[in-house]
Amino acid sequence: MRFNAGGMGPSHFRLLETLASHPCNLSEIAEKHSVSMPTISNSVNLLVERGWILRTPASRDRRMVNIAITPAGQQVLDDSQQRLESRIGQRLVELSPEERERLMVGLQILRRVLEPPVLDERSSE
């Protein structure tokens, strides 16, 4: 599952997901993905060559460059997500009812652990 048919690695998938929500500049992307500027620049170059993302000069500062997903990149992202969901769905069907129930309980626990804590309004007084 690490690579899809389009030859997209996990880091490329995450980059497309980031850009699907909104355009970013290189430094924002590098910071969000905790990688160096040269590393993210290489990934961006590859995805630009494939036509999946586009560099455009920022309107206020021509020295800045915004990176945005293209319709072709959005299609690749959508197709990849559909394939992944299908593969996971096929695997889940193979589980016994008891295994599916245990999985659901485990996912509920994981969700509870990963959710941000709810602040008690009384504790802030």
Image (cartoon, rainbow, N blue to C red):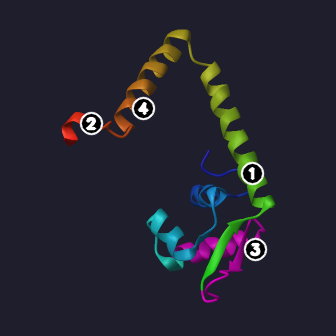
Mark 3 or mark 4, whichever is nearer to me:
4
Mark 1 or mark 4, whichever is nearer to me:
4
**What residue do we see at 52% from left, 80% from top?**
38
Near mark 1 (Cα within 10 A), the count class, few <14, some 14-19 or many ≥20, is few
| Residues at circles 4 and 2 in contact by the CB criterion of under 8 Å | no
Mark 1 or mark 3, whichever is nearer to me:
3
State the image coordinates of residue 7 (x, y, percent, origin top left).
Answer: 70, 58
Rendered view: 47 above or below 118: below
- Which residues are drawn in magenta? 39-63
Quadrant in which the N terminus is drawn = top right
State the image coordinates of residue 46 (x, y, percent, origin top left).
Answer: 68, 72
Q: Closer to the N terminus: mark 2 or mark 1? A: 1
Mark 2 or mark 3, whichever is nearer to me:
2
Mark pair 1, 3: CA separation:
17 Å
Kind of residue indicated by mark 4: Arg
Rendered view: 35 above or below 112: below
Kind of residue indicated by mark 3: Glu
State the residue in front, 95 or 72.
72
Question: In this rendering, would 83 be left or right of 109?
Answer: right
Circle 4 SS class: helix
State the image coordinates of residue 47 (x, y, percent, origin top left).
Answer: 70, 68
Residue under label 1? 5
Q: Which dot marks residue 111? A: 4
Q: Closer to the N terminus: mark 4 or mark 2? A: 4
